[in-house]
Structure formats: C-alpha cells, structure tokens
Image (cartoon, rainbow, N blue to C red):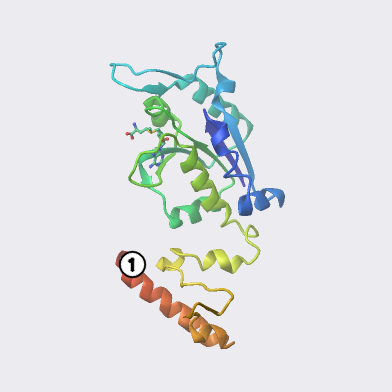
Amino acid sequence: MRIDILTVLPELLESPLNHSIVKRAKEKGLVEINVINLRNFTTDKYKTVDDYAFGGGAGMVMMIEPVFKAIEKLKSERHYDEIIYTSPDGEKFSQKLANRLSILNNIIILAGHYKGVDQRIRDNLITREISIGDYVLSGGEMPAAIIADAIVRLIPGAISDEQSALSDSFQDDLLAPPVYTRPSEFKGWKVPEILLSGNTGEIEKWRHDQSVERTRKLRPDLADNE
Ligand code: SAM
C-alpha cells in the first residue's frame, strides 16, 4: 500500500509516522508513506501556499495551484483509489472506515491548514472527506497521521500477532476486554483469578463476557449491533 500525504507543514508528520508499528510496517515493505511538501509546488520565491479569502473575513485559505499541481503529478504516476481531505465537516472516522481503507492500494491524504483549502479542490479532486471528531484542530496533519496509523496497523503482517489487531476495540462492535501483566498482585490489587488459571477456553469466555459488559456499560450504542 502507498499513502501520500500532502501538507504545508511536513515537520508535524515526522515523529508520528516514524516509530512503532508504522515504522516497522514501512521497514517490512508493507506500506510506503510519503510526506509531500506543498511548498515544492509553488512558483514564487516565498513559496506561498495561502492567500486571503475572497469576500473578506479573518483567516487565510490554502491556494488551489500548489494542491492541484501536487495531486496531478501524483495521479500522472499511478492510479489512486481515494483522494482524502481531512476536514471537521467530513464523514466521521471509524474502525469500519479504517478497515475499508486498509485494503486499498494507493491513497492521497490532503492535510488542510489555515481556514481550509479552496473549495474548488474539494469539489473537483477530492473523493472522500474525513473528520476525526467534532472539534477543530489547527491543521490536518494530526488527522492525517491518525488515519494513516489506524490503516497501517490493519495491513496483514503489520502487527506480529495478527489476532491482536482483530481483537482491538470496535472490531465486531465490541470494546476490548481489560488487560493485565506482571506482577499478579500489586499493593493488594489483584489480577482476576481466571487469567492465572491457564484454562484458555475459560479465559476466552471471560474476555468475551468482559467485552460485552464494557460495551453495554460504556458504549450502549455499539452493543445494539452486537
Ligand atoms: N474553518 C474550518 C472549519 O471551521 O471547518 C477549520 C479549519 S482548521 C483550522 C484547519 C484544517 O485542519 C482543516 O482544513 C482540516 O484539514 C484540519 N482539521 C481540523 N480539525 C479537524 C478534524 N476534526 N478532523 C479532520 N481535520 C481537521
């Protein structure tokens, strides 16, 4: 899989995409992630990527030309399954959407900045708009990193124990069960007996029951789909 992220602030994406599971997935050749600086697609000496909004008002707008040029260049090199714009008014990101995106070959994620990108880019080049939640961040870089991370960990082989990703919260509309590690007792706080029993069948049943109970208690909206 290939993920190309377009941004005016590539520095913001350096750390999140270069550690842990995403880093290992890149090293294993499971995913190629390119962070592309939109300033490389400008023509003036100041590498301008924003301009005043038509009609006035506070805040700058991401200009059409650098984004258009960057997307057209990428599209001339390969087919893209989705060209995503991160936006607070987009479709809410979810595990189900991450699952669907994880089986694609090539995607572009455009990280917005300032007041957002010129609407004509959204109308003519973007195939999907995604929000990571009902709040407004300064830029789309963190949303892009979140979307990329959620996708990459689902690519077969990205996590050594593939079952681990499948047993995470929201797969099967259930929250994950609680987890414990050594020591089995700390300051009188004990690990549930069943987890120390070695009885894998009973442990699996306990975990499932815990998932169902937690889902009913914390996210009854998910339990309806159970
Ligand atoms: N004026 C825009 C609005 O009210 O919807 C917000 C612009 S925001 C300051 C700058 C950029 O950050 C957006 O264009 C978008 O790319 C990104 N962004 C901010 N919050 C986001 C969210 N919740 N989900 C996805 N992207 C977000």
| Image quadrant, ligand 1 | top left
Direction right: furthest residue: 28
Direction front: furthest residue: 187
Residue behind mark 1 = 218
- Estimate how packed mark 1 is, as few (under 14), some (14 to 19) or many (20 or more) residues with alpha carbons within 10 Å: few
Q: In which quarter of the image is the C terminus?
A: bottom left
Please say if 91 is above or below 72: below
Ligand 1 near label 1 (Cβ, under 8 Å)? no
Q: Nearer the viewer, residue 168 or 105?
A: 168
Measured as percent of width and height from the top left, residue 149 is found at: 54, 50
Amino acid at the residue labelled 1: Leu
Direction top: furthest residue: 45
Measured as percent of width and height from the top left, residue 21 is found at: 62, 54
Asked whether residue 226 appears in the rendered view, the answer is no
Q: Nearer the viewer, residue 100 or 141?
A: 141
Q: In this view, does 30 lie to the left or right of 101?
A: right
Residue depicted at 33% across the width and 45% down the height: 134
Q: In this view, does 149 lie to the left or right of 94?
A: right
Residue depicted at 33% across the width and 65% down the height: 219
Q: In this view, does 158 lie to the left or right of 134?
A: right
Measured as percent of width and height from the top left, residue 7 is found at: 52, 31
Please say if 114 is above or below 46: below
Residue depicted at 49% across the width and 37% down the height: 141
Q: Is mark 1 on a helix, strand or loop?
A: helix
Q: Is residue 27 left or right of residue 122?
A: right
Measured as percent of width and height from the top left, residue 201 is found at: 54, 86
Please say if 85 is above or below 31: above
Residue depicted at 57% across the width and 56% down the height: 153
Please say if 104 is above or below 183: above
